[in-house]
Structures are given as structure tokens and as C-alpha cells.
């Protein structure tokens, strides 16, 4: 469903991403790994429309989307989380989820002001969807707490829930396990697998936690200094000499 | 640390001297055709020196003073109040609000004409502040030229009535819509700007509108303004002693009561009250709608908002447009109340006052903003003797607020949303 071909991104003199290709099929978890500064987040930023790549193509469901504005990309069904959690901190947990559903709610102003029955039905639906996902990530009791007051692990889960209420086809997670303790990481592991199994969402995952990556990925892409180093199944990557030298060996 | 403090304190004291001495010390005195510069009197010199010493001491012991001030909230009886239970609070709130509105409806019949007039002005400021609250408090866009939209509303009515004989009721929606249109048009160029840059551009826009009004003499009368703006009518009944317009009747004759100039004042007050209540209710509803949440989301984190499919353009423009719409509303009422408007009424100071109301009240909080509007508009009237020092008191109040309660009088409280667990 997603096909990235020879993606390049240059910042002035720095070629942060150099000819990276990757593809994601439906019902698949694909990981991107590589040392810090390898250009992983930059790949995400290109895919999600924050940067306009300086070279290469990005195809989503057969359509070229490179350079499409960010807010349009998420409307196509590709949403992302951020390496550093970005919540609407002074809004409550449930409001964070409601913001994300503005499209389902996007009636015109008048029907909202008058609270027409149609508007109410939609509003109720998005509240139901919000409480469903809050329950799913274990935040239902905290629905009316300001998002900025949540613990770090809870904020991470809220960010994923906020993506899921938009009912995406493809989810891009940028280091979702960073800063989590081992038990939280295990929960995250199960959550991501369940997103794929139960909700039929494909996942692109950037992650440093190798056990998590090896455990749940269907395929892995390794990039190093902006260039693709290897790609394949977890087993192939584990036994790839280049990867061991460049990345695993150093850890 | 101490040495640094000393240096800083000295510096502040010197700045005080340098600024205060020429401003307060020198006087321009007219003698015949000449103007002579007169030196400072000893008394002034001593006062300026005392002020410098005060600044020096304050800066030297600033940390201690601020720590004391920081403790002050503990003295505030409301600070540690337990939040009331949700259902009970909502009920109480709606009862109190209804009582206030009913009270406000009947109150003008028992007080002086001056008080009603002032109250009308307060209501106009409430409308303005509620509208600006959308732009600054909710959407987080610092708009320093808000008064421009107020001017557009007022001048729309003034011009339409002067040239085409439009009545208040026709001009009211038109003024608001035209102001909204201006909001939309200004919105476009400033979309990409943030923070200080946005503030500067909007400030410039406000000034441009005022200068245009000042200079398009043939249309707007320039600094002379426009007079003879008609009062609102009630179902074709005029409130003047004699009917001005063909086809209208007069209020006191129709009802068979004696003419009183107070009828008109009270009627205007009631119109302003109704419009202010409508403004508050509409904005309150918008805050709980997707648009309102989108405004806040954009204020909180623009990148995250965009990643979720919110278009920055649409969200910012809607905030600007809706804010401007209510300023236009207020402007029309203002023009009708004054009967005469000139660019004088739409100077930057007005923008600053409205912004101060929003900040003092607590960004995003409607009740806070309404209370602050009442305080900021009525206090200077009550303390007439101090009117020379009005801006000084204003500034001091702002500084104290920022130290003591940076979140405003009544910070915004999130709405509680009841969720049912799903099976
Ligand atoms: N907006 C930008 N401007 C300039 N350089 C950037 C920008 N974004 C990322 N870079 C650079 O690109 C390189 C890759 O960064 P990044 O994609 O964040 O790496 P990773 O996520 O793999 O740790 C880094 O050297 C970084 O400094
Ligand atoms: Mg990164």
C-alpha cells in the first residue's frame, strides 16, 4: 500500500536521506532501524508531508503523495506519532481524541450551533469512539485529566489512541517505546500487534529497542547515515554482517 | 549573585533617573510667542531621586519581595477550594447565571441614566473582549489590531445610515458581516506569522484602518467624524421626542406615556445586553464544537494539529473571522449609542485595553473575561479623581497580576465530558 522509491532529502549541504526505498504491504509491520542521526525521522517527515523530499517518490495506494501538504496526507489515512510526544497539553485526554475526529464531525457551523439531530448523532459516535480507544489503552478513568498531567507512558499511549480514532490505514510510530519501562514496552508490543491483527492497520515503526523490533516486525529496513544498509525479515537482519558491524555490534 | 543584583539594581535606578528627570523635570512654558524650557523645581528633583532610590532598593531585594508575593496566593480564600461535584456545580452555575441575567434586565429601571449609559459601554466591551478571546485566548493568535474590526462595524452603520438611510437593525448584521470579511481578508497574509510577527502586522493593520478613516475625508468626514447616527427603533417606534423618519411612530405617544430621554438609554442598554448574551452563548457553543477544539489544538501544538488533518489556514481564518464578526456587532451598537463616531474612538489604546481585559480575565475563560471587562471599564469611572493616573494604575495592575496570578482572574476550566465504558 505504501511504496517509497529512492527518497532523498537534502538540508543545505547535508544529505540526511539518500536514496532510501521501502514498501509496506497491507497487514504488515515494517520497522526502520539505524543509529541516531541516521535519517529515520526525516523519512517519516517526508512521508507525512512535513518536508517536501528533494528526490524520489512516495506512493500511497498507487498515488504519488510526495510534497502533498501534511494535513491532506493524514486525511488519506496515514497518521503518525512523534519522537517527542506531541499532545494538546492543556486540553483533556478525551478532548485530544475529539480534536482528531474533526473530520467525522465536520458538519457546518450552523448545524453545530443549532445542535441538529444529525450533529448529535455524529457527536455521540465520536464520543463512543473516543471512549472505546481510551478503554483500549487503559486511560478511560483519566478521560477528563489534562493531557499534560499524564505520566510519560500514558502520554505515549494517548498519542497512539489519538491516531487510531482517525481510523487510519497506515500508522507511523516514531520511537514509541523510548522512555518506557520494560513492562510498558511489553504492553506496547501487544498493542501494536493487535492494531495489525484486530484493526487491520499497517504499521511503520522506528524503534531502538531491538527485542521489540525483532519480535513484532514482519520486515526490517536498516539505514545508516541516510543510506539504506539492508532490508529483510528479522532473521535475515540478525545475521547480516553489514548490520552487525554498523549497528548491532556497536550497541 | 549579590554583586550581580547590585549592578542590576544600579542600572535600573540610573534608567529611572534618565527617563524620569527629563519627562517630569523639564517644563515647556509659553512666554509671549516663545516657548522656554524651564528647569526642574527642587521638589520634583527630590521626588525623582526618591523614586530612583525606591527602584534601586526594590531591584536589590527583588528576589525576597517576589518570594513574598509568591506566597500571597495562599491568602486567597478561593485558591484551595475543593472543586464542587460536577452535576451540582452545573446546576448552581445555571441558576446564578439566570439570576444575573434577570437582574440585569430589570436593573436599569431603578438606577440613574449615567449608570445605564456606563453599563451599556461595559456590555460593548464584554462583546469585544469575548470576541478577542476567541482569537487570543482560544486560537492563541496575538492580535493587536482588533479595534480595526470594531471600527469597521461602527463605520459601516454610520456610513450606511448617512448615505442610504439604513436603520440600526439592517446595519447590525451588515456591520458584523463586513467586519468578518475584513477579518478573513486580514487573515490571509498573516497565516504564516506567529507570535511577535503576527502582533506587529495586526497592529499595523489596526493603524492603517484608523489612518484611512482619518484621511478619506470626502467619505468619512476624516477627523470630524460622522454624526447624526440614528438610534435603534422598536418595531418602527422611535425614542426621540419627535419622529424623525417618515412612517415611524414615536414610542411615548404609542404607549401613551410621558416622554423621557431615559427610555432610549434603557432600550439601548437592553439591546446591548441581549447581544452580549447572544455573543457569550454562541461562543460558548463554538468552544464545545469541533471548530473550538481545533482553535485550541492549533494553539497547543500546531504540528500535531496538522498531523491529524487540521488545516492551519482554515482554523486560523475561522478564528479571525468569528472574532472580527463580534467586534463588528459591538461597533454597530457603539455607533448607535454615541450617535457620533470619529477615528479618535478607534486608537491603538482601545486594542490594548480589550487585550488587557482578556489577559486579566484569564485567557479562554468567558466568565473571567466578563468580570475583567466590568472591572476595567467601571473602575476608571468610579475613580474619576485618579483619571490622570488611569494608565499608570492599569500598568501596575497588569504587572501585579502577572506576578501574582499569571493565569488571569478566573482561568479557563475544561468542560467535563462524561464517557460511558463500552462493553
Ligand atoms: N529540518 C532540518 N534541518 C536541517 N537538518 C536536519 C533537519 N532535520 C533533520 N536534520 C538532520 O538530518 C539528520 C537525520 O536526522 P533524523 O532524521 O532526526 O535522524 P534519526 O531520527 O534517525 O535519529 C541529522 O543529522 C539531523 O541533524
Ligand atoms: Mg529520530
Image (tube, coloured by chain):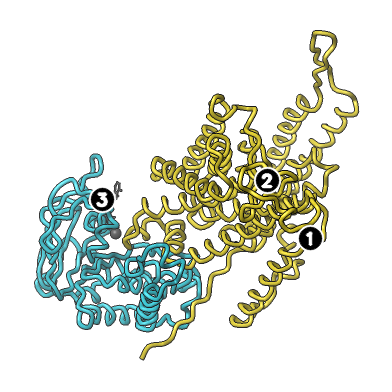
Chain colours: A cyan, B yellow
In this rendering, position of residue B263 left or right of residue B124: right
Does the residue at mark 3 contact the one at mark 1 (Cβ under 8 Å)?
Answer: no
Tell which subunit mark 1 falls on: B
Q: Which residue is mark 3?
A: A51
> Crowdedness of circle 1 by 10 Å Cα count: few (<14), some, many (20+)?
few
Q: Which residue is pictured at 71% across the width and 59% down the height?
A: B70
Residue named by callout 1: B109
Where is the C terminus of chain B found, in terms of image quarters?
Answer: bottom left
Checking the image for residue A183, the label placed there is: none
Say whether mark 2 and mark 1 are on the same chain: yes
Q: Which residue is mark 2?
A: B337
Point out residue B288 in the picture as x, y percentages from the top left corner.
48, 68
In this view, the residue in front, A28 or B315, is B315
Indicate the secondary structure of the residue bearing disc 1. Answer: helix
Q: Chain of mark 3?
A: A
Q: Earlier in the sequence, mark 1 or mark 2?
A: 1
* For the residues bearing labels 2 and 3, Cβ distance under 8 angstroms: no
Amino acid at each position: 500500500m505504501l511504496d517509497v522509491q529512492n527518497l532523498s532529502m537534502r538540508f543545505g549541504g547535508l544529505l540526511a536521506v539518500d536514496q532510501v526505498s521501502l514498501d509496506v504491504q497491507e497487514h504488515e509491520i515494517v520497522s526502520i532501524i539505524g543509529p541516531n542521526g541516521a535519517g529515520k525521522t526525516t523519512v517519516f517527515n517526508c512521508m507525512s508531508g512535513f518536508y517536501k523530499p528533494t528526490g524520489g517518490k512516495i506512493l500511497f495506494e498507487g498515488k504519488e503523495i510526495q510534497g502533498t501538504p501534511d494535513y491532506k496526507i493524514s486525511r488519506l489515512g496515514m497518521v503518525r506519532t512523534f519522537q517527542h510526544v506531541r499532545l494538546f497539553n492543556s486540553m483533556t485526554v478525551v478532548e485530544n481524541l475529539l480534536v482528531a475526529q474533526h473530520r467525522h464531525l465536520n458538519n457546518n457551523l450552523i448545524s453545530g450551533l443549532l445542535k441538529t439531530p444529525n450533529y448529535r448523532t455524529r457527536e455521540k459516535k465520536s464520543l463512543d469512539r473516543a471512549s472505546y480507544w481510551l478503554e483500549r489503552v487503559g486511560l478511560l478513568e483519566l478521560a477528563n485529566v489534562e493531557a499534560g498531567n499524564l505520566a510519560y507512558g500514558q502520554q505515549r499511549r494517548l498519542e497512539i489512541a489519538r491516531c487510531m480514532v482517525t481510523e487510519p490505514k497506515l500508522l507511523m510510530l516514531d520511537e514509541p517505546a523510548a522512555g518506557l519501562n520494560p513492562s510498558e514496552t511489553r504492553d506496547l508490543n501487544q498493542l501494536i500487534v493487535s492494531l495489525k491483527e484486530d484493526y487491520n492497520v499497517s504499521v511503520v515503526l522506528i524503534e531502538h529497542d531491538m527485542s521489540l523490533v525483532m519480535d513484532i516486525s514482519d520486515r526490517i529496513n536498516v539505514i545508516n547515515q541516510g543510506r539504506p544498509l539492508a532490508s529483510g525479515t528479522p532473521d535475515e537482519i540478525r545475521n547480516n554482517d553489514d548490520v552487525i558491524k554498523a549497528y548491532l555490534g556497536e550497541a | 549573585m549579590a554583586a550581580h543584583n547590585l549592578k542590576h539594581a544600579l542600572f535600573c535606578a540610573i534608567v529611572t533617573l534618565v527617563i524620569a528627570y527629563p519627562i517630569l523635570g523639564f517644563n515647556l512654558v509659553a512666554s509671549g510667542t516663545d516657548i522656554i524650557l524651564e528647569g526642574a523645581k527642587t521638589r520634583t528633583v527630590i521626588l525623582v531621586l526618591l523614586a530612583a532610590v525606591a527602584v534601586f532598593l526594590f531591584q536589590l531585594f527583588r528576589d525576597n519581595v517576589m518570594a513574598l508575593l509568591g506566597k500571597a496566593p495562599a491568602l486567597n480564600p478561593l485558591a484551595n477550594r475543593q472543586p464542587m461535584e460536577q452535576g451540582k456545580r452545573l446546576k448552581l452555575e445555571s441558576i446564578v447565571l439566570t439570576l444575573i441575567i434577570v437582574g440585569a434586565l430589570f436593573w436599569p429601571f431603578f438606577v440613574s441614566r449615567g449608570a445605564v449609559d456606563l453599563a451599556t459601554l461595559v456590555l460593548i466591551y464584554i462583546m469585544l473582549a469575548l470576541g478577542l478571546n476567541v482569537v487570543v485566548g482560544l486560537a492563541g493568535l496575538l492580535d493587536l489590531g482588533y479595534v480595526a474590526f470594531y471600527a469597521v462595524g461602527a463605520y459601516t452603520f454610520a456610513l450606511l445610515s448617512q448615505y442610504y438611510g439604513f436603520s440600526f437593525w439592517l446595519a447590525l448584521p451588515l456591520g458584523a458581516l463586513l467586519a468578518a470579511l475584513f477579518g478573513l481578508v486580514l487573515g490571509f497574509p498573516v497565516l504564516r506569522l506567529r507570535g511577535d510577527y503576527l502582533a506587529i502586522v495586526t497592529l499595523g493593520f489596526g493603524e492603517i484602518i484608523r489612518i484611512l478613516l482619518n484621511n478619506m475625508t470626502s467619505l468619512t468626514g476624516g477627523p470630524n467624524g460622522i454624526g447624526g447616527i440614528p438610534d435603534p427603533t422598536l418595531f418602527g417606534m422611535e425614542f426621540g421626542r419627535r419622529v424623525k423618519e417618515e412612517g415611524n411612530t414615536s414610542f411615548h405617544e404609542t404607549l401613551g406615556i410621558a416622554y423621557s430621554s431615559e427610555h432610549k438609554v434603557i432600550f439601548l442598554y437592553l439591546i446591548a445586553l441581549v447581544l452580549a448574551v447572544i455573543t457569550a452563548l454562541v461562543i460558548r457553543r463554538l468552544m464545545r464544537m469541533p471548530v473550538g477544539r481545533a482553535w485550541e489544538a492549533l494553539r497547543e501544538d500546531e504540528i500535531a494539529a496538522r498531523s491529524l488533518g487540521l488545516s492551519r489556514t482554515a482554523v486560523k481564518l475561522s478564528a479571525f473571522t468569528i472574532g472580527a464578526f463580534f467586534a463588528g456587532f459591538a461597533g454597530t451598537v457603539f455607533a448607535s449609542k454615541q450617535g457620533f463616531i470619529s477615528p479618535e474612538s478607534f486608537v491603538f489604546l482601545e486594542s490594548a485595553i480589550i487585550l488587557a481585559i482578556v489577559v486579566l480575565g484569564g485567557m479562554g475563560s468567558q466568565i473571567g473575561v466578563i468580570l475583567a471587562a466590568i472591572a476595567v471599564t467601571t473602575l476608571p469611572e468610579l475613580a474619576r479623581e485618579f483619571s490622570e493616573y488611569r494608565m499608570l494604575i492599569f500598568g501596575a495592575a497588569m504587572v501585579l497580576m502577572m506576578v501574582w496570578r499569571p493565569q488571569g482572574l478566573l482561568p479557563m476550566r475544561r468542560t467535563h465530558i462524561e464517557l460511558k465504558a463500552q462493553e
